[in-house]
Image (cartoon, grey):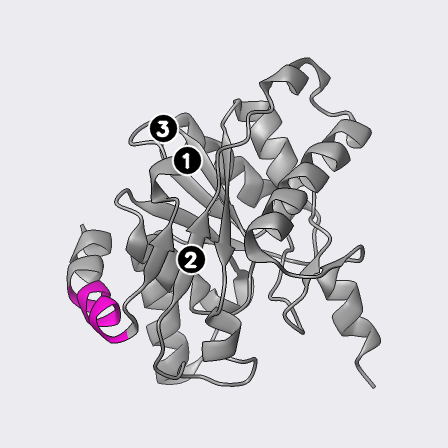
Amino acid sequence: MIYWVLKATLGSLLWAVYRPQVDGLEHVPEDGPVILASNHLAVTDSFFMPLVVKRRVTFIAKEEYFTGTGFKGWFVRTFMKAVGAIPVDRAGGDAASASLDTGKRVLSEGRLFGIYPEGTRSPDGRLYRGKTGVARLALQTGSPVVPVAMLNTGELQPIGKRIPRIGRVKIKFGPSLDFNRYRELVGDRFIERAVTDEVMDALRALSGQDYVDEYAAKFKEKGKP
């Protein structure tokens, strides 16, 4: 209920201010489980993409959004919980697996599940190597994957800028990808990598971003002093 209230109130305001330009929304099925796999350029991607989709979208969100302190921490935590975001420990291990298990539950209920295969925001606007969680979800649930390209959110909200500048948000949805031909090969790491790479190639074609065959998190680590 809170999700739809927020979408009707805050969503209407965001729509009026940022006037989203959306292409390919017809590729999102009206019912049934679907994985929405998006590139990730800005924090507001998690606001704008669900805003333009008629159905409810459940996202994985980094654990830090749920552990902040003070009024800002409370507000972010409350908002994330209200929109059904699922915390994920990006350090990997059992916590990440548990979050993907939750994703499988969402899909088993016939809902939309949003995921950023890169695992983190792009540090420089390029598209980075995808993690194989999206492949595991697709293969284990049989759900189609709809690639989603956020085209200019990184320009409206560069890293370090809290409030995005005013401008028209552009989003593009691509044709769904069906990986059921690999269902018998669930758990094969080479197949999981091939499926993930196919998703990332679709995102590259949609977004026009330059592709980097390296994990974004590792690239960020190299840039630290």
Please tell me in which quadrant of the rendered image residue 207 appears. Answer: bottom right
Q: How many marks?
A: 3
In this rendering, position of residue 213 left or right of residue 144:
right
- Which residue corresponds to mark 3? 110
Location of mark 1 (residue) = 106
Q: Amino acid at mark 1?
A: Val
Between label 2 and label 3, give the one nearer the viewer.
2
**Residue drawn at x 64%, y 16% as measured from the top left:** 181
In depth, the one of 80 and 153 nearer the eye is 153
Q: For mark 3, give the secondary structure.
A: loop
Q: Which residues are magenta?
A: 9-17
Q: Residue at x 72, y 63 (%)?
A: 216
Decide: few, some or many residues near mark 2? Use Cα within 10 Å; few <14, some 14-19, many ≥20: many
| Image height of 92 relative to 168, above or below | above
Q: CA distance from mark 1 to mark 2?
A: 24 Å
2 or 151: which is nearer to us? 151
Where residue 171 is drawn, which disc sits there? 2
73 relative to 3, above or below: below
Q: Does the magenta portion include 127?
A: no
